């Protein structure tokens, strides 16, 4: 897993001081353990990115001295794993097509909106976190994002590091709330245990940070992480308690 668990390094490069301040506040409000560097032109941004490698770079395409597109080209040629969010008007989807598909590069149209920014930064961090052949990696969600869909195959199990999610079913077009999942709990473990498809939807209520574990590695990970094994036992015990309480209420 990448070092995102301990710190998340952002570089904001914008020609507008007010925009820099707003983005700093947004990042601090939505992402834990964030370190933020800022720059007001492309040359300064390049210098800072070479001295402290950022995970995510936000670039205003009106940057002077070195354009945001030239700076992005330089970043993409580096060996480090860096994601770029470009704020531009008009939208230019023909640039960096391959990187846009993977999520390494994203374009945001102006005027910038908080929800779109949070989702873009979340997707960028997910791209950073994913490392092939890793037994687990971090998964980031903005509020109101679907993590699990009812009926899907259970390929992953998740341990919630921070945030809150809800589980629900859809019955006759209505949402039936099953409960909430808090930090320290597993989610998606029942599909792994019973070998069946997902029995419910799971959606983030707040910004969330989770550990995503492929089902094929779950036994290996639990064996190597005793604390996670205890968290699984605690989660299953709570699920059983909730189920028994629901049955008691119905009987009464």
Image (cartoon, rainbow, N blue to C red):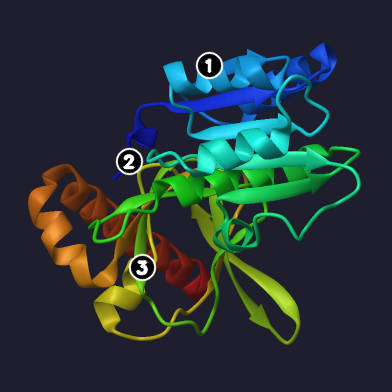
Q: Nearer the viewer, mark 3 or mark 1?
A: 1
Q: Residues within 10 Å of mark 2 (few under 14, many from 20)?
A: some
Q: Residue at x 85, y 52 (%)?
A: 91
Q: Is residue 245 left or right of residue 216?
A: right
Pick whichever, 175 or 218, lies toward us.
218
Q: Is residue 157 among the parts visible in the rendering?
A: yes
Q: Position of residue 187 (x, y in %)?
A: 40, 60
| Disc ID at residue 229 | none
Q: Secondary structure at mark 3?
A: strand
Q: Position of residue 203 (x, y in %)?
A: 59, 60
- Farthest left residue in view: 223
Q: CA distance from mark 3 to mark 1?
A: 37 Å
Q: Secondary structure at mark 1?
A: helix
Q: Is residue 248 left or right of residue 216?
A: right
| Disc ID at residue 48 | 1
First of labels 3, 2 by sequence position: 2
Q: Residue at x 46, y 22 (%)?
A: 50
Q: CA distance from mark 3 to mark 2?
A: 18 Å
Q: Residue at x 83, y 29 (%)?
A: 62
Q: Residue at x 50, y 67 (%)?
A: 249
Instruction: Please give the residue where the numbered disc 2 appears in the rendered image.
Output: 2
Instruction: Please give the residue where the numbered disc 3 appears in the rendered image.
Output: 156
Q: Secondary structure at mark 2?
A: loop
Pick whichever, 21 or 163, lies toward us.
21
Pick whichever, 237 or 17, lies toward us.
17
> In which image quadrant can residue 12 be found?
top right
């Amino acid at each position: 897993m990448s070092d995102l668990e301990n710190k998340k390094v952002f570089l904001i490069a914008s020609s507008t001081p007010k925009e820099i301040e707003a983005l700093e506040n947004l990042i601090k409000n939505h992402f834990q353990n964030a370190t933020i560097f800022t720059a007001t032109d492309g040359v300064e941004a390049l210098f800072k990115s070479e001295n402290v490698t950022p995970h995510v770079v936000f670039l205003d395409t009106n940057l002077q001295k070195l354009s945001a597109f030239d700076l992005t080209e330089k970043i993409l040629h580096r060996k480090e794993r860096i994601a770029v969010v470009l704020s531009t008007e008009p939208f230019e989807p023909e640039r960096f097509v391959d990187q846009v598909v993977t999520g390494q590069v994203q374009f945001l149209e102006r005027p910038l909106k908080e929800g779109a920014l949070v989702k873009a930064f979340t997707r960028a961090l997910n791209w950073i976190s994913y490392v092939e052949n890793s037994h687990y990696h971090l998964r980031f969600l903005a509020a109101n994002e679907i993590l699990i869909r009812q009926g899907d195959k259970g390929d992953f199990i998740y341990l919630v590091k921070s945030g809150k999610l809800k589980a629900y079913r859809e019955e006759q077009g209505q949402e039936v709330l099953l409960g909430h999942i808090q930090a320290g709990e597993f989610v998606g473990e029942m599909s792994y245990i019973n070998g069946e498809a997902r029995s419910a939807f799971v959606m983030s209520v707040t910004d969330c940070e989770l550990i995503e574990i492929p089902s094929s590695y779950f036994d290996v990970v639990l064996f190597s992480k005793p604390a996670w094994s205890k968290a699984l036992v605690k989660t299953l015990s709570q699920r059983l308690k909730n189920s028994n309480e629901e049955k008691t209420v119905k009987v009464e």
